[in-house]
Amino acid sequence: MTTFAQLTTTQVSQAEADLTEPETRDALAEAYFELADRDEPFLVIGGGSNTIVSDDGFDGPVLRVATRGVEYRPGEGGEVIVVADAGESWSELVDATVARGLSGIEALAGIPGSVGATPVQNIGAYGQELADVLVRVEVADADAGERRWVADADLGLGYRTSALKREELLGLVLAVELRLREVDSTGGAPVQYAQLAKALDVELGERVPVAQQREAVLRLRASKGMVLDPSDVDTRSSGSFFMNPIVRRSFASEALPASAPRFDAGKDAEGLELVKLSAAWLIDHAGVQKGFALPGSGAAISSKHTLAITNHADATAEQIAELARYVRARVLAEFGVELIPEPNLIGLQL
Ligand SMILES: Cc1cc2nc3c(=O)[nH]c(=O)nc-3n(C[C@H](O)[C@H](O)[C@H](O)COP(=O)(O)OP(=O)(O)OC[C@H]3O[C@@H](n4cnc5c(N)ncnc54)[C@H](O)[C@@H]3O)c2cc1C
């Protein structure tokens, strides 16, 4: 018997999963089409690091993506094309590409989960995101009823979103194709995140060797409980529980203190300037501190990072949701900003 607690990194829900785990890309596509044809709900899961399932479980089949395989081929002008099966571990793929001296995803080291889920929310960290290197993905397209390669430009990738996440494209990712760059021992992608530059003692935009950048990212992530570690309860989470809110600059100027961090985020459909806020700052300044737990609950804010809701002591899924609701209500009351959850919540209401 496999429980949802065993399938997810937050490790909640003792309900049993009705699991299918095809071993090849062809079998995975076939299993997906079969489920999609049935017209009944089913759940796709990779590493379960962005999924939280209710204590009642999920009433339907669960398709677990665990297919393996990575292929490297030369691209143009020092580029290397990497094609990875959806069930590969993302962090292992980063480690392997860094070991080969390839640059492009070194700052995405340590992000848990599968390769196939990376385009779903266009993973990002420390100044890099998947969209920077993604060429195309192979999907089993439920509407078309066939397998096809979809170019990155057609995936509608944005901040923690994609056409897949928004369900504009109903499909299962079977494989992901990336374009990385071969660099010599001194090269690497420019450091694009102030905190990372500080940790590396370099200027923002300076290039550092890929292995060095990867190691610095892993150290920073570990200090925030953002690298899975079975001995550290702070990592029993789904990473950041809330996305950084994007609001109009005019709203931020009126509603938030000048000390609230904000970053340019383009313009909205009406041409008004947008800024991205720090969800961690908002939570902290709404009075919810690291380590906070509601009385009698096994769920707690990580002791290392305000943005992670952790299963601190045999939490239930409902306790995780209860704490998330509390955090959201505090931020809304204090700043008038509604936080949006990042993980895929199954059977749970916030
Ligand atoms: C400690 C920690 C740190 C994290 N840090 C970051 C971070 O820095 N940046 C970041 O962006 N994310 C971060 N995350 C979130 C998470 O790791 C990523 O979103 C990751 O890509 C999820 O992969 P997964 O395989 O675990 O997805 P799952 O949780 O299994 O699935 C997530 C969603 O994708 C769908 N899905 C899964 N596989 C496929 C597929 N093959 N085809 C179509 N849909 C699919 C699922 O149905 C679900 O809706 C973190 C999580 C944790 C626990």
Image (cartoon, helix red, strand yellow):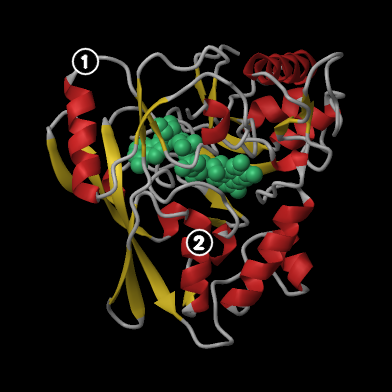
| 76 and 28: which is toward the camera | 28
Query: Residue 248: x, y in percent?
Result: 60, 29
Q: Which residue is mark 2?
A: 92
* Ligand 1 has an atom within 8 Å of the beta carbon of the residue at disc 1: no
Q: Is residue 257 above or below residue 70?
A: above
* Quarter residue 128 falls in: bottom right
Q: Amino acid at mark 2?
A: Glu
Relative to 296, 265 lies left or right: left
Quadrant (top left, top right, bottom left, bottom right) of the C terminus? top right
| 328 and 3: which is toward the camera | 3
Q: Amino acid at mark 1?
A: Asp
| 229 and 195: which is toward the camera | 229
**Residue at image location 35% in from the left, 17% down from the top:** 60
Query: Residue 154: x, y in percent?
Result: 27, 44
**Residue at image location 48% in from the left, 32% down from the top:** 268
* Quarter residue 134 falls in: bottom left
How many residues crowd mark 1 within 10 Å: few (<14), some (14–19), many (20+)?
few
